[in-house]
């Protein structure tokens, strides 16, 4: 019998995808899990759809915190989470994913209550502290007991900050998700119902990072660059970006659509000529699906994807955006590359195994 019980805290879109794989692996390993949803993402298209299509266990609790400033959102999660965790009897371990405000709040509350913390996707660094996610990662890693790293670079980052104990190279649970769901996406999603373009005749773009959305001139430069590509651009729009656009009229070639679920996004991406994005998850999915990626940022946490020119960092400069696309089309870019080489055991099984050890320990 495990000594501790596992409680997982999720709240934002990419965390539901990661949880889909890890929760499955935990169930296979016979480990019971309670799931708490912070409510950071709450629109049906940002939350519910993932639980429906990925068979993620329904949360046992929804803290319903909604949106707000960083302090307000993080504070609300902390307050409500503390109350729920205090209501559980016996020793616990708390699992958090990635680098959102939900991750940070979960880690701080768990640490103050004296529960060991499992951080899945530990050790990532952009070395840009202007990103809220970078602060969330640094603090969460520092407080964590079990640090599950997706890449060797992540292990190195932690070592250079003096963290070696409890650090494991598990591989990337998002890789497991892409591998697991790509075939299902292909089978179940009808591209014609999503967009008026044929496979290979469009590019995909997504923009949601504060550094891009919250500065109007930067957001306009990105749209100007996308408008000059000379190819239709399909942009599933994050509510944050939609709100920031106000009455700005985007270029005619940019087709804005509602946010997509995971399966629709995988399908859209896998048939695109290229993807332009500031999302970390999409950079990796593009790499694994062999779709060239142009990252609308100056740095990336996923430096492995830069190998062989599969990912390029261009920031928000319209000329650089256009040039990157030109380079992709000139190269007739359909090169092949090796998928991430990981341990033979899948990443989610590795995470579940380490969690099992922690719970029994
Ligand atoms: C958050 C994460 C980011 C992650 C992203 C995934 C932080 C600091 N950022 O960013 O790391 O990449 O999730 O999508 O945690 N909104 C809605 N409906 C929703 C959710 C949000 O309308 O269901 C709008 C609100 O106006 C809100 C804004 O989007 O203020 C931003 O949402 P928030 O959760 O604060 O951050 P994200 O930009 O989604």
Image (cartoon, rainbow, N blue to C red):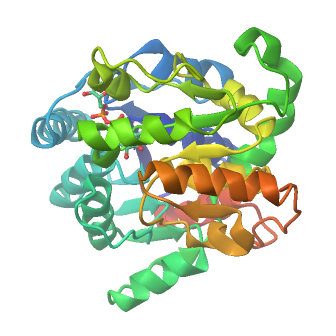
Residue 254 placement (x, y as % from top left): 56, 24
* Residue 333 found in image quarter: bottom right
Query: How many badges with numbers are in the image?
Result: 0
Determine if residue 47 is in view.
Answer: no
Q: Of 66 and 59, which appears nearest the observer? A: 66
Give the residue at the far top of this rendering: 193
Q: In percent of the image, x 61 and y 56: which residue is there? A: 323
The spot of residue 242 in percent (x, y) is 36, 21
Between 260 and 59, the residue placed more toward the observer is: 260
The residue located at (59%, 80%) in the rendering is: 152
Q: Residue at (87%, 62%) from the top-left corner?
A: 335
Q: Is residue 78 above or below residue 144?
A: above
Q: Residue 251 at x, y = what percent?
A: 49, 24
In the displayed structure, does residue 141 sit left or right of residue 268?
Answer: left
Task: Pick whichever, 290 or 163, lies toward us.
Answer: 290
> Visible in this render: residue 289?
yes
Q: Quadrant of the N terminus?
A: bottom right
Q: Residue at x 49, y 59 (%)?
A: 314
* Along the viewing direction, whichever of 315 and 152 lies nearer the viewer: 315
Residue 353 appears in which quarter of the rendering?
Answer: bottom right
- Left or right: 284 with respect to 278? right
Residue 167 position within the rendered picture, expressed as x and y whole percent measured from the top left: 48, 78
Q: Quadrant of ligand 1?
A: top left
- Decide: is 222 above or below 151: above
């Amino acid at each position: 019998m495990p000594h501790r019980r596992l409680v997982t805290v999720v709240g934002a879109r990419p965390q539901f995808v990661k949880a889909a794989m890890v929760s499955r692996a935990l169930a296979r390993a016979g480990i019971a899990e309670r799931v708490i949803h912070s409510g950071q993402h709450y629109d049906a298209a940002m939350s519910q759809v993932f639980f429906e299509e990925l068979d993620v266990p329904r949360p046992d609790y929804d803290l319903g915190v909604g949106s707000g400033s960083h302090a307000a959102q993080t504070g609300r999660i902390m307050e409500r989470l503390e109350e729920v965790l205090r209501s559980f009897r016996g020793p616990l371990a708390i699992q958090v994913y990635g680098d959102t405000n939900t991750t940070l709040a979960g880690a701080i509350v768990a640490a103050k209550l004296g529960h060991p913390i499992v951080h899945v996707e530990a050790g990532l660094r952009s070395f840009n502290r202007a990103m809220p996610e970078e602060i969330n990662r640094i603090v969460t890693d520092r407080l964590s007991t079990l640090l599950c790293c997706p890449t060797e670079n992540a292990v190195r980052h932690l070592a250079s900050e003096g963290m070696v104990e409890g650090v494991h190279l598990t591989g990337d649970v998002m890789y497991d998700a892409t591998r697991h769901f790509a075939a299902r996406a292909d089978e179940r999603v009808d591209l014609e119902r999503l967009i008026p373009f044929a496979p290979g005749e469009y590019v995909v773009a997504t923009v949601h990072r504060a550094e891009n959305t919250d500065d109007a001139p930067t957001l306009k430069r990105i749209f100007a660059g996308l408008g000059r590509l000379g190819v239709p651009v399909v942009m599933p729009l994050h509510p944050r970006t939609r709100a920031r656009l106000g009455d700005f009229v985007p270029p005619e070639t940019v087709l804005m659509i509602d946010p997509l679920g995971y399966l629709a996004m995988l399908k859209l991406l896998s048939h695109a000529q290229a993807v332009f994005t500031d999302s970390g998850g999409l950079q990796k999915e593009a790499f694994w699906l062999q779709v060239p990626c142009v990252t609308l940022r100056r740095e990336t946490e996923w430096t492995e994807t830069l190998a062989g020119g599969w990912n390029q960092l261009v920031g928000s400069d319209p000329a650089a955006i256009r040039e990157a696309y030109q380079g992709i089309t000139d190269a007739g870019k359909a090169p092949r590359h090796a998928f991430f080489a990981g341990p033979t055991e899948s990443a989610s099984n590795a995470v579940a195994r380490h969690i099992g050890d922690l719970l029994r320990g």
